[in-house]
Amino acid sequence: MSFTSAMTSPSQASSRRCSMGYSSSLRHPPTQPWGNHRALPCIFAHRRVSGSSSAMPKDRDGQDDWVTSRNNVGGAVLSMAAFLGSVMLTMESPVYAVSGGGGMGTSLSFSDFSGQDLSRKNFNKADLRGANLTGTSLEGAQMFGAICSEAKFVGANLRYADLESADLEGADLSNAVLEGAMLSNTQFRAIKSIEGADFTDALIRKDVAKALCGLESAKGTNPETGVDTRESLNCGP
């Protein structure tokens, strides 16, 4: 064998590797959605060696392996696109629905929750400024540090709700039931009305209760429980 004949060009070497095993993988494409990545060097090796599509190896159906492999690659791209699309569709994004449960700084200002059952929902540190909570059930709701300024709690059920450190400035608590509610450090500045509100067994500081007793709206009887507002605050004579 001469030195010249022993030399093998890169294209011939690629073609030889195809004949040693890669071609079988071309004729029997794998089932993975990303296709046969090992077959790609063989595809281009055949093109460089032959110089024409007529010299391309044939698959079992008599079609060019180039066509078969090209279809595999196209299918792989489509499969990957479908996979990524399904991942994007299943990714959850923040939802601020009117069913409640926002919490942790969620902005629900001026939302209308009137008449809804939001018992035991999480509104911790939520922005409920100007929200309409008329007749809403918030029994056992978590509202720690919630901003409820100018909110309407008229006739709302706030039994055992956690309103610790909540801001109720300008809020309307007319006829609301706050039985057993956590009201420590709750801000009642410029509260609009507490007429008919029931504070029975609510955890509230004595100085705050005394200040509420001094309000003009500290009067009336709760229409649901029949409890006098001043009596529920231990206002005295």
Image (cartoon, rainbow, N blue to C red):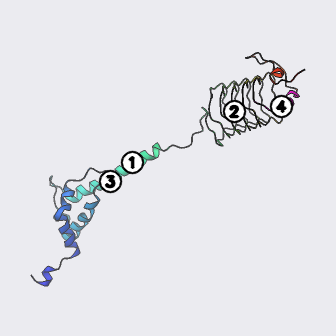
Residue extending farthest bottom: 3
Q: Would you say the residues marked 3 and 4 are in contact, meaning their CB atoms lie under 8 Å apart?
A: no
Earlier along the polypeptide chain: callout 1 or callout 4? 1
Bin the neighbour count of mark 3 within 10 Å (Cα to Cα): few under 14, some 14-19, many 20 and up.
Answer: some
Which residue, given by chain and number where applicable, does mark 2 sit on? Answer: 162
Distance, label 3 to label 2, CA atoms, is 53 Å
Image disc number at residue 23: none
Question: Dividing the picture into quarters, in which one does residue 206 lie?
Answer: top right
Magenta segment: 201-215
Earlier along the polypeptide chain: callout 4 or callout 2? 2
Q: Residue 234's x, y, as percent?
A: 83, 23
> Which amino acid type corresponds to the residue marked 1 in the rendered image?
Phe
Of residues 99 and 184, the one drawn nearer to the viewer in this rendering? 184
Which residue, given by chain and number where applicable, does mark 1 sit on? Answer: 83
Which residue, given by chain and number where applicable, does mark 3 sit on? Answer: 34
Q: Residue at x 19, y 60 (%)?
A: 23
Which residue, given by chain and number where applicable, does mark 4 sit on? Answer: 206
> Which amino acid type corresponds to the residue marked 4 in the rendered image?
Lys
Earlier along the polypeptide chain: callout 3 or callout 1? 3
Between disc 4 and disc 2, the foreground one is 4
Q: Would you say the residues marked 1 and 4 are in contact, meaning their CB atoms lie under 8 Å apart?
A: no
Between disc 1 and disc 4, the foreground one is 4
- Label 3: state its secondary structure: loop
Between disc 3 and disc 4, the foreground one is 4
Q: Residue at x 21, y 57 (%)?
A: 25
Res. 7 in view: yes
Q: Residue at x 41, y 49 (%)?
A: 84
Earlier along the polypeptide chain: callout 1 or callout 2? 1
Q: Is residue 23 left or right of residue 177?
A: left
Quadrant that contains the N terminus: bottom left
